[in-house]
Structure formats: C-alpha cells, structure tokens
Amino acid sequence: MDPKRETPKKSNTEHLIADRREGIGVCGWILVSISFLLVVITFPFSIWACIKVVREYERAVVFRLGRILPKKSKGPGLILILPCTDTFIRVDLRTVTCTIPPQEILTKDAVTTQVDGVVYYRIHSVVSAVANVTDVHSATFLLAQTTLRNVLGTKSLAQLLAGREEIAHGIQDILDSATEQWGIKVARVEIKDIRIPVAMQRTMAAEAEAAQEARAKVVAADGERNASKALKQASVVLADSTAGLQLRYLQTLTTLAAENNSTIVFPLPVNMFENLGQKNRGG
C-alpha cells in the first residue's frame, strides 16, 4: 500500500471508539485506581456518589477522563460512576416535537406565503448525539427551518396547496439523511398551515367563482340541447297524429288550471279555422 495515500476520514464517533481501544494510559489508570481506592475507604458513604439511576426512557453516556466509556450508552437502571474521574450525560430517547414557526417563503411563481410545520424526531444513537454535535435539538430545529424554506421555494403555489403530503415526505427524507450522523431519526414531518395574502385569496376566489359559472353555463347549454332534441322528436310524433296533438292541448290546459290562474290562453290549431271558413262559403 502506498504510504502517501490518504486514509478515509473517520467520523467523530469512530474516532472516540478508536481512542478507547488505545487505552487511557498509565497516568489514567493511576488516577482511576486512586479514585476506586477512595471509594473503598469511604464506603458506605461514597456509595451515594457512585450509584446513579437512569430512567427507562433515558440512556447515559459515561466519560472517564474525557473518553466515552464504553463505546455504547448505559441504562436503564443503576449505573456506577467513579468520583473525580467519571462524568455522565443523560439523553432522553422519547419522541421530540419540534414546532417550526411561520416562515415567509417566496414560491417559484413569485407568490409570498407564510408556512409553518412540525417535525417529530427521536434520538436513536446516544453516543452520536452527544459526541458529534454540541446541541442536537437546536441543530435539528435550525436545519428543519432551513430545509422547509429551501424546499418550498422550489414549488409553485398550486403545487404547495395540492401536494402537501409529497412535500412533507421529501422534507422528511432530507432531514433524516442530514441528521443521521447526529444520531437522529426523523419520524414524521407535517405542514400545518399555508397563509397567502388577502388580495391573492380574493383573486383565487374570483377565479374559482368564474370557473364554477363557466361549468354551470356548459351544463345549462347541454340541457337545452338535449331538451331541443326531445322536443323535435315529440313534434315529429305529434305531427303524425292529430288526436295526439289535441290530447296534448288538453293536458296543457289541465296543467294551467291546476296553478289557479285567472286567465287561460288556449291555442287552437289554424286548420280548424280553415275548415270553418270553407263550411261558411259552402253554405
């Protein structure tokens, strides 16, 4: 192997584990031995400083002389801490709700909107959450804000209103990939509310109303066309039957009489007057 070839960079967690394999050195073991001796000498009073309780939903990362010991977290239950040489940090494993405040976003089609959301995440690697980032919750919160603005800035207003779930899944994938080295698992991302300017709301309402009116006119025109076709067919049938035409007249008269009208207009066929005129001439 070429000695000049660069070796891959190790992550912070791998670096800490490698240091642990190298040991704490002779001086470190001397300090640990002295601390253990003090615990034995002052027993049972020292037991209260050595035993710590870790809850069921917590894990503890123990540092011995600044090194993580062991390479995985401890708990739940009782853990043993040596005074003077050991320190520990408790980490909560429960799901954390991160509320993203309203973010002012300029969409792809130049519409200013305010969008807020919520992110649900939990810590799945305690050592990574402690060793790789200063404040894992603050870092996740800021990253969620930035990711929300960046992703929504590439969408139009129509896509934003119609594709909330798809956008939320995309944001979740980005956050989950970015926070993996921090020991974070993003469980869910939701877009809560989308606020648009009042003028834009009125414009969208007018556009929707115009679309509704256009559809209503199309439906009415289709109805008129179908009615005209039916009337045409009915006229053809009535033209072939004079008695049928008279029955239709009587039915119309019955309908008008049922509406309590004081005036009834009753149409008479023109051929009746022609027949009467021919009879008068003949007489």
Image (spheres, rainbow, N blue to C red):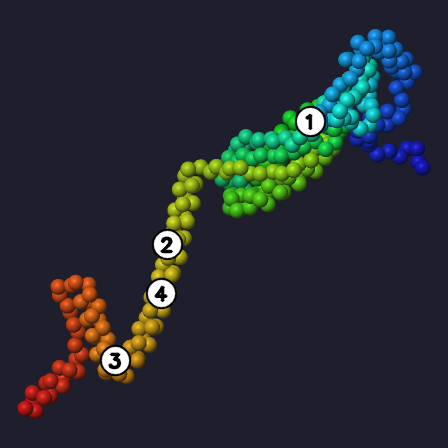
**Dividing the image into 4 quarters, which one contains the C terminus?**
bottom left
Identify the residue position indicated by label 4 in the image. 223
Position in image of residue 37 (x %, y %): 88, 11
Question: Which label number is shown at residue 213?
Answer: 2
Q: Label 2's element?
A: helix
196 left or right of 167 in image: left
Closer to the camera: disc 4 or disc 3?
3
* Residue kind at label 1, given as amino acid type: Asp
Above-or-below relation of 212 to 23: below
Question: Tag 2: Cα neighbours inside 10 Å, few (<14), some, or many (≥20)?
Answer: few
Judged by depth in the image, the label closer to the viewer, 2 or 1, is 1
Tell which residue pokes out farthest to the bottom in this image.
282
Residue furthest to the left in view is: 283
Instruction: Say which residue label 3 marks.
Output: 244
Q: Position of residue 146 (x, y in %)?
A: 61, 33
Locate residue 178: give its quadrant: top right
Distance in Å between CA atoms under marks 1 and 3 = 89 Å
The amino acid marked with disc number 3 is Gly
Earlier sequence position, callout 2 versus callout 1: 1
